[in-house]
Amino acid sequence: MSETSTPELIQVSTQGRVGIVTLNRPKQLNALNDQLMDELGAALKAFDADDNIGCIVITGSEKAFAAGADISAMAKYNFHEVYKGDYITRNWETIRSIRKPVIAAVAGFALGGGCELAMMCDFIIAADNAKFGQPEIKIGIIPGAGGTQRLPRAVGKAKAMDMVLTGRMMDATEAERAGLVSRVVPLNQLMDETQGAALMICEYSLLSVMAAKESVNRAFEGSLSDGVMFERRLFHALFATADQKEGMDAFLNKRKASFSHS
């Protein structure tokens, strides 16, 4: 999708400084195909480059965040096509380059690629009807968008093996208990709760928010000693920002900080 084209499989909106992307293939329960992922990537990059946006939300419908990758599209592929075409890596992983926080608001099914997309976000807020799973084993393949890697890091080896090898689904209560989601809320409060969290993040200094995201991701993917040093250097660097001066002065003078994101 070019920057000037109109997306067909997503809806894009804003609320204050929050950018919202809604997956919109209702008849297919938001099954993920190349066009949708191209459009999603373009929307995420546009929000990331927009100085008026401080946080991004990805959501779907009440029935499905995304029920998986589009199997009708995948079924015809062969090894040559997926390897040469860099399937998944080419466009699904655009989200990993986004520096602003990305929250997944998940209702209904988040299965296969849908679960993997949610896990690529910085955290997940789930409706009480949410269902998570990696059922690829049932169709003769394995997760291919990070499911075998991010799921164990979120819920531990035992639960990840259970889900990947049996294809069973995990409900919202179990997902919160296992550490896959940050909080569970009633379905009718999902977007209010998620947008509330996003708006709260937007009130803070964007520089410190981006640094915090980068540092937590380093903990997720690297060693403790390297992660602590990375955190320390970013912590030191923030003392060069106007927002650090403003934030500490506001605290000492018992007033609300007014961050300039500089």
Image (cartoon, helix red, strand yellow):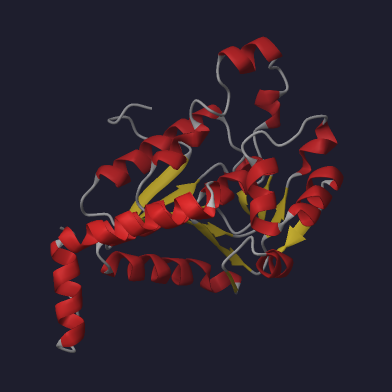
The front one of 230 and 15 is 230
Horizontal and vertical percent for residue 129? 68, 65
The front one of 248 and 71 is 248
Whether residue 251 can be seen here: yes
Q: Count up the numbered dots.
A: 0
Horizontal and vertical percent for residue 155? 69, 58
Horizontal and vertical percent for residue 261? 18, 60
Q: Is residue 118 left or right of residue 103?
A: right
Q: Check the image and report above or below for 11 versus 172.
A: above
Picture quadrant where residue 259 is located = bottom left
Task: Determine the residue positioned at 83% across, 29% down.
Answer: 140
Q: Is residue 168 left or right of residue 113?
A: right
Check the picture and name the quadrant holding the C terminus.
bottom left
Check the picture and name the quadrant holding the N terminus.
top left
Task: Determine the residue positioned at 40% across, 54% down.
Answer: 229
The outermost residue toward the right is 166
Q: Is residue 212 left or right of residue 88?
A: left
The front one of 213 and 218 is 218
